[in-house]
């Protein structure tokens, strides 16, 4: 029923100082010891070191014969034989040229001879976009002239729907408007210039260093000619055609303090809607009884792993779906425990709206709401991640005999806090309920005590009334990867949310920041196979043409032409919420950007702003305290895929955390080069 993200590919030792983040855990004693954890947790860097050391110490192992050698591959020979001496370039221009050529090959593969690439880049003074335009337009003209049986890469205006020629046998192709984006402020050599190339273990791997031809590089000409797909349909038209009969998809993240009853509430809704069979429920009842945890029976619907069930807490984002009158709702059940905030952020990053669950039991609401509790932190985080519609489930009200007084006490406190956090009163709805008894969840209450003072909607009706945000399907593709796993067939799967654009089966996409071209072999949305997926969909896609170990959580699948900007430095407008010591120049932080967690530092404090007007109060302030708003420059330890907030909201937001506490949230205002 529910599916958990596979967190295998997150390198915890990379991301966190274990003591800093986990040091305050109340569960510490019952946790795995660090050495046990180390043994079981996947460690990206450790794995890669192991592979490279294995390769270097086993020279006798022959490479697979299907890997083409230099001699046998004409394109490689051609690449190796570029002689730049005749061009009389200085070092910088040579670097620009090589970088542009790399970018062009990423898009075009080996369909265009090297000398033409070099000539075109030189003609356009190393301008990647112009060179690419010219080459593609030349190809188009040639194609039209020769009416060749093979489709060459073509750039199309989306408004002018292309004519589909049926007399030529061409592979089924898809397309997109490919005018170079002005939004990609850093392009061509600026992204990939050798100077700015990151020295990460991943990029130092033999495969990357020697640019071993990947399978995509080796495909024969007829296949490579279809690397860029022609889009036959306007994305908006395609979206309305595909989805017109479907209910709107709504992604809802369930947040709140540990043990507020989130999983029980969602499990109970799923059971009451008939999404969980009686047999399964009976099994959960028996098994949870055996462990002495019968009260967690409904939570088991979403808490699927043995450790989660044994410990009685959610550790990773649980996923399930149900339908309301007008919507298909996909729930993302986030962990409430402070140790798992990074997973909660991943869930919140995929959500359209949020359901905040608070425990109405006396003393429990207070400990979740007071400083250090997760109620405030979760609410602030989801708001900072762009969620603006919220339902608040005042849960476990059965423990207070459905007291109106208690309900009012809780909602009064929450109202003033949520307003400060940036939620409009009109976008927040409060619902009294009980996940355990099922009261007021999927149908209006029959509980006499509650009926005395409540005649509002049940939780399901509140969820049904949420507005579904516009899906930016016409923008270039951006899909951030939050999970990587081996599928059943060839290739491997990556899962994540399509932030903008469309993915069709058979599309070529660029895996960024490494910029390797891959092909989409299959698409599934919420575990259902599909030929196409759109912005807003949470999908898993099978990739081929790129090695699994070269892809990491936090990478982005990008439109190959209108590429996602890649940089290690950017400017952001920060709101500082919670710092023990003021932020000064060089302040180290962990940056959370979608599912990516990287070390970074605030390298420049540019201006302190007035919170409400945005006017500059002070240029180059020396420090930033709590509740300040400021423009800063942030440098990440290695280049990441990042967008300006005004271009792609979802990739233009960052959270900054220090020692397990979220200290600030920021919107990216500019992308800079180092
Ligand atoms: N009395 C009462 N108990 C409840 C209710 N909802 C949940 N509980 C109990 O609260 C405990 C915690 O429930 P969970 O659903 O695991 O809480 P959670 O918020 O998902 O926990 P984490 O995901 O680990 O943060 C369990 O023992 C539940 O039986 C309720 O409405 N009334």
Image (spheres, rainbow, N blue to C red):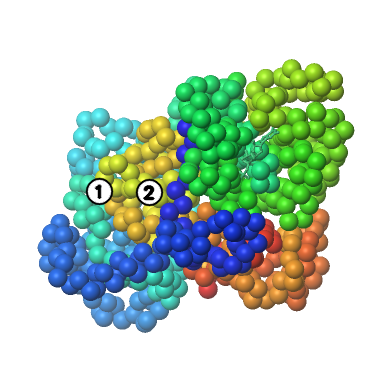
Q: Where is residue 117 in the image (x, y as percent from the top left)?
A: 29, 63
Task: Identify the element where label 2 is drawn.
Answer: strand
Asked if one can make out residue 647 in the rendered structure from this viewpoint, the answer is no
| Figure quadrant of residue 502 | top left
Q: Do the residues labelled 1 and 2 touch (CB within 8 Å)?
A: no
Q: Which residue lies furthest to the right in this view?
A: 405
Q: Is mark 1 within 8 Å of ligand 1?
A: no
Which of the 4 image quadrants contains residue 604? bottom right
Identified at 70% across, 65% down, the residue is: 631
Residue 583 percent coordinates (x, y): 71, 71
In primary-sequence order, the first of circles 1 and 2 is 1
Instruction: Answer left or right for 169 relative to 447.
Output: left
Whole-Å distance between the Cαs marked 1 and 2? 29 Å
Q: Is residue 125 left or right of residue 309?
A: left
Q: Position of residue 64 (x, y in %)?
A: 16, 60
In the depicted structure, whether residue 312 falls above or below residue 41: above
Kind of element beneath mark 1: loop
Report which residue position mark 2 lands on: 485
> In the image, 527: left or right of 27?
left
Q: Residue at x 60, y 28 (%)?
A: 268
Report the residue at 17% width, 72% height from top.
59
In the image, residue 28 above or below residue 178? below
Measuring from the top left, give residue 135's x and y in whole percent: 32, 56
Q: In this view, does 621 lie to the left or right of 31?
A: right
Is residue 381 in view from this perspective?
Answer: yes
Q: Residue 627 lies in what quarter of the image?
A: bottom right
Q: How crowded is the residue under tag 1: few (<14 C-alpha within 10 Å), some, or many (20+)?
A: many
Q: Where does label 1 land, which residue?
A: 225
Q: Out of 215 and 81, give the one closest to the viewer.
A: 215
Q: Quadrant of ligand 1?
A: top right
């Amino acid at each position: 029923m529910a599916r958990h993200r596979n967190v295998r590919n997150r390198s915890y030792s990379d991301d966190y100082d274990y003591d800093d983040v986990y040091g305050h855990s109340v569960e510490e004693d019952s946790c795995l010891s660090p050495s046990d954890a180390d043994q079981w947790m996947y460690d990206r860097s450790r794995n890669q070191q192991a592979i490279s050391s294995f390769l270097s110490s086993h020279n006798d192992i022959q490479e697979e014969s299907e890997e083409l050698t230099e001699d046998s591959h004409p394109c490689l020979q051609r690449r190796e034989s570029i002689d730049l001496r005749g061009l009389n370039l200085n070092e910088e221009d040579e670097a620009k040229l090589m970088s542009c050529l790399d970018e062009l090959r990423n898009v075009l593969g080996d369909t265009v001879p090297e000398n033409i690439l070099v000539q075109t880049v030189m003609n356009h003074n190393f301008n990647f976009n112009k060179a690419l335009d010219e080459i593609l337009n030349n190809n188009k003209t040639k194609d039209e002239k020769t009416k060749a049986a093979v489709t060459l890469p073509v750039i199309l205006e989306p408004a002018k729907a292309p004519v589909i020629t049926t007399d030529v046998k061409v592979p089924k192709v898809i397309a997109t408007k490919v005018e170079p984006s002005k939004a990609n402020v850093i392009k061509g050599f600026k992204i990939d210039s050798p100077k700015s190339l990151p020295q990460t273990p991943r990029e130092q791997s033999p495969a990357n260093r020697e640019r071993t031809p990947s399978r995509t590089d080796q495909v024969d000409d007829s296949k490579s000619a279809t690397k860029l797909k022609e889009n036959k349909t306007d994305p908006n038209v395609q979206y309305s055609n595909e989805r017109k009969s479907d209910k709107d998809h709504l992604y809802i993240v369930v947040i709140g303090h540990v043990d507020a009853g989130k999983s029980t509430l969602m499990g109970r809704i799923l059971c009451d809607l008939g999404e969980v069979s009686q047999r399964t429920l009976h099994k959960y009842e028996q098994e949870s009884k055996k462990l002495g945890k019968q009260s967690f029976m409904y939570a088991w619907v979403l808490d699927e792993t043995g450790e989660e069930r044994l410990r009685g807490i959610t550790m990773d984002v649980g996923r399930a779906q149900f339908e309301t009158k007008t919507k298909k709702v996909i729930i993302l059940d986030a962990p409430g425990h402070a140790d798992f905030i990074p997973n909660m952020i991943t869930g919140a990053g995929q959500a359209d709206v949020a359901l905040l669950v608070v425990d109405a039991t006396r003393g429990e609401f207070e400990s979740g709401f007071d400083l250090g509790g997760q109620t405030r932190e979760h609410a602030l985080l989801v708001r900072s991640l762009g969620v603006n519609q919220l339902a608040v489930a005042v849960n476990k009200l059965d423990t207070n005999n459905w007291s109106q007084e208690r309900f009012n006490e809780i909602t009064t406190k929450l109202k003033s806090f949520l307003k400060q956090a940036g939620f409009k009163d009109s976008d927040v709805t409060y619902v009294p309920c009980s996940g355990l008894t099922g009261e007021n969840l999927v149908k209006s209450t029959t509980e006499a005590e509650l009926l005395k003072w409540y005649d509002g909607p049940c939780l399901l009706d509140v969820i049904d009334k949420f507005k579904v945000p516009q899906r930016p399907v016409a923008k270039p593709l951006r899909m951030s990867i939050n999970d990587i796993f081996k599928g059943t067939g060839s290739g491997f799967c990556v899962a994540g949310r399509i932030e903008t654009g469309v993915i069709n089966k058979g599309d070529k996409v660029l895996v960024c920041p490494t910029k390797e071209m891959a092909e989409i072999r299959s698409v599934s949305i919420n575990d259902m196979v599909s030929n196409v997926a759109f912005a807003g969909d949470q999908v898993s896609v099978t990739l081929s043409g790129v090695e699994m170990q070269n892809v990491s959580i936090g990478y982005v699948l990008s439109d190959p032409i209108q590429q996602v900007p890649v940089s290690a430095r950017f400017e952001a407008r920060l709101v500082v919420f919670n710092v023990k010591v003021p932020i000064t120049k060089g302040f180290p932080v962990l940056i959370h950007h979608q599912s990516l967690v990287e070390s970074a530092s605030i390298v420049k404090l540019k201006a302190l702003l007035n919170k409400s007007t945005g006017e500059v109060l002070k240029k180059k302030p020396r420090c930033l305290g709590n509740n300040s708003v400021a423009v800063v420059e942030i440098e990440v330890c290695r280049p990441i895929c990042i967008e300006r907030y005004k271009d792609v909201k979802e990739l233009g937001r960052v959270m900054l955390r220090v020692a397990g506490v979220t200290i600030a949230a920021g919107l990216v205002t500019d992308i800079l080069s180092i």
